Image (tube, rainbow, N blue to C red):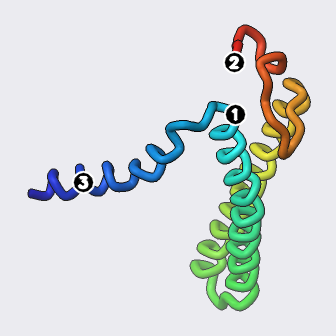
Amino acid sequence: MKNLLKGSAIVGSVLPFLAFAQTDATSILFTIATFIANLIPVLITAALAYFIYGVVRFVIAGDADKKAEARQIVIQGIIGLFVIVSVWGLVGVIQNTFQIGTGGVITGDQLPGVQF
């Protein structure tokens, strides 16, 4: 019974994509790019908030154990910010390499070996 519920949940989550079955690959890629462009500032804000949370915990910590825990939170926040900004930069490099503008449409000329 659980497998049936899981299967129906998966099928139900895929149904909205079936409505887009008449669209072409460029509009799907544009939708994904728009979603990622909107997601990145949210992720950066969350990582920055986590980092600030760790700094506040470090400042108010009394003993060495609590300071060590807070230091780990700060380090994880810095690593998270680095990863998010690095991936964002990598996406920018890929956009510049393939000459894909933000908000534009990908044509067959921009992708080597692919014809639409």
Residue pictured at 71% horizontal, 68% vertical: 74
Image position of 59 with respect to 5: above or below: below
The residue beneath circle 3 is 8
Image position of 47 with respect to 7: above or below: below
In the rendered image, which quarter is residue 100 located in? top right
Residue placed furthest toward the top: 113
Amino acid on which disc 3 is placed: Ser
In the rendered image, which quarter is residue 18 located in? top left
Q: Nearer the viewer, mark 2 or mark 3?
A: 2
Residue density around tag 1, few if under 14, some if 14–19, many if 20 or more, within 10 Å: some
The residue beneath circle 1 is 26
In the rendered image, which quarter is residue 56 located in? bottom right
Amino acid on which disc 1 is placed: Thr
Spatial CA span between label 1 and label 3: 29 Å
Q: Position of residue 108 (x, y in %)?
A: 77, 18
Residue pictured at 84% horizontal, 45% vertical: 103
Q: Earlier in the sequence, mark 2 or mark 1?
A: 1
Residue density around tag 2, few if under 14, some if 14–19, many if 20 or more, within 10 Å: few
Q: Nearer the viewer, residue 101 or 75?
A: 101
Q: Position of residue 104 (x, y in %)?
A: 84, 39
Say whether marks 2 and 1 touch (CB < 8 Å): yes
